[in-house]
Image (cartoon, rainbow, N blue to C red):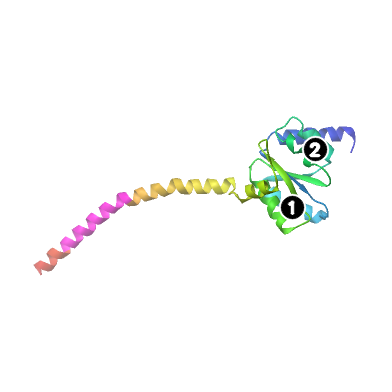
Amino acid sequence: MDRAEKQELVTTLNESFSKISLLVVGHYSGLTVREITDLRRQMLAAGASFKVSKNRLTKLALQGTKFEAISNLLTGPTAIAYSADPIAAAKVAVDYAKKNDKFVLRGAVMSGQVLDVNGVKALAALPSLNELRAKLVGLVQAPATKIAGILQAPGGQLARVLAAYAAKDEAQAA
């Protein structure tokens, strides 16, 4: 990689860091290319990105961003995962680390706040943005359904009372 390619990589990473809200750092020592590719695919499916790059270049890209505080974790064979969704990258990274002990989480930064490994695991335990949206829609729809049921109930009760009186009158007439 020549100097121009390195500068382009740093610029691209720096631009990416301005659009995200979570950056997770992990060690990948001992992972095969197939395992890294699998992890990368899982990240992409969740809407996150996974990158293995030189620590020095990543540190340069982090300068001036809200993620700069994590540069001290960039030692050894590190990879970064990042996403605009504050939970997506953490969920995939934690799940993958549980299945494969060669991938070790080091920490994360979420909107400028540094998280240790336990913080990343706690973040991964939270529902994702899509899950929260689904719950919110369910909560919004539930009262409307209940109101419709309540509004229909008196009419239904009145109809049942009238039907009972009609049946009573018919029984007395017969």
Is there a contact, CB below 8 Å, between mark 1 and mark 2? no
> Label 2 belongs to which residue?
58
Assign the magenta stretch its main secondary structure. Answer: helix
For the record, the magenta segment spans 150-166
Give the percent coordinates (x, y) of residue 130: 57, 47
Kindly report which numbered mark, 1 or 2, lies closer to the viewer in this rendering: 2
Q: Earlier in the sequence, mark 1 or mark 2?
A: 1
Q: Return the x and y of residue 88 as percentages of the image width and height.
A: 65, 47
| Magenta run includes residue 155 | yes
Q: Quadrant of residue 85?
A: top right
Task: Give the residue at x 74% y 52%.
Answer: 39
User: Can you say which quadrant of the picture contains the N terminus?
Assistant: top right
Residue that mark 1 sits on: 39
Residue 10 is covered by the magenta coloring: no
**Which SS class for mark 1?**
helix
Residue at the spot 54% in from the left edge and 47% down from the top edge: 132
